[in-house]
Image (cartoon, helix red, strand yellow):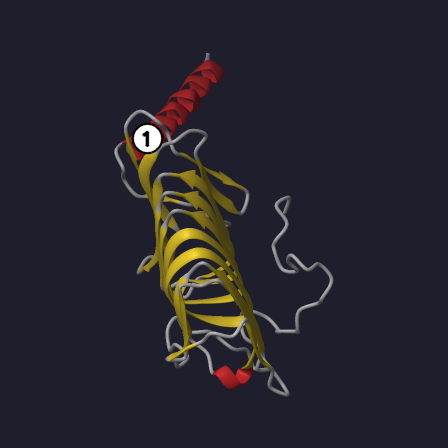
Amino acid sequence: MKNNFFLLFFLSFYFFIFNFEIFSQENNTLIKAGNEVVQIEISTNNVDVYISSHDKNFIAYEVKEKGDKRISAFENKKKLQFYTTAVTEGEIFIYLPKNFLLESCRIQSTNSKIEIQNIKSIYFVLSVISSDINVLTSKFKNVLLAINHSKINFSSGIVAVADFCMNTAQGTIEIAEKMQNCNLFMTQIKNKNLVFNGEVYKNSSLSYAPKKPKKYISISASFSELDIKFIPPLDTPSVSVNKYGISEFGPVPPPKIVDPVSNFLPGRNK
């Protein structure tokens, strides 16, 4: 009898907690993610994504759905994932603690508005079609942006490596780093207009290689209208450095020229 009482109590408690979580999601309240989450992965269609920082000491998220199609949100060990299996309208809001360092942030989206502000991540991967993108006041160690038929406003710092691949794109790319620290290689094909550091650039390629580069940046653009420039490094978000002078992003070795597609994308099976 006593065992049955404890079993009934446990089942009732579990049912209450389970329904509370479901109730929270359906009513668009803020949901606290697990303490072990350090990766974000999003694969959606017609869903707007907002990622920013907040004053709390935990990661939180909120899903707002429009219509009867669901946006799946779940945690898989240290990864927070969002995806849709059909055309779905809605919004995803993700809030990170200030100066929190993500291991990776990967977003694949179509017909969306994406706004990212004041975050830090070792890997940042963005692959979008027909979207409106704003990536502001953030810092990333390794960046891969594949942009097609989209508007882009990128103004952030790059710690080590960045690849920008853009087709039929329009907007501004501001690299918040000192140009003399960057190994830069840029190519263009049939762009409507390409402005680099305030001047219209018409040549097919540009190469800038200082003797001791600290960062490696490549930009490829076609059929686009872009304003690309270097701006002063950002003061925020701050980057902590240990007593040996190594930042929280880790040491920054030059990229290994092994795979021409990408050397730094995090494995999906981790």
Residue depicted at x 65% and y 57%? 261
Q: Tally the numbered discs.
A: 1
Question: Is residue 8 shown above or below 178?
Answer: above
Where is residue 2? Give x, y as percent: 46, 16
Question: Is residue 106 shown above or below 177?
Answer: above
Classify residue 108 as left or right of residue 208: left
Report whether residue 89 is seen: yes
Q: Check disc 1 and give the amino acid type.
A: Phe
Where is residue 98? Give x, y as percent: 37, 64
Classify residue 227 as left or right of residue 216: left
Where is residue 124? Give x, y as percent: 50, 58
Report whether residue 57 is seen: no
Question: Few, some or many C-alpha atoms within 10 Å of disc 1 (few <14, some 14-19, many ≥20)?
Answer: few
Query: Which residue is situated farthest in the right direction here?
Result: 258
Question: Is residue 85 shown above or below 79?
Answer: above
Q: Quadrant of residue 264?
A: bottom right
In this view of the protein, which residue sits in the foreground, 110 or 254? Answer: 110
Q: Quadrant of residue 77?
A: top right
Q: Which residue is mark 1?
A: 20
Classify residue 123 as left or right of residue 44: right
Where is residue 142? Give x, y as percent: 55, 64
In this view of the protein, which residue sits in the foreground, 4 or 40? Answer: 40
Q: Quadrant of residue 28?
A: top left
Question: Is residue 97 shown above or below 46?
Answer: below
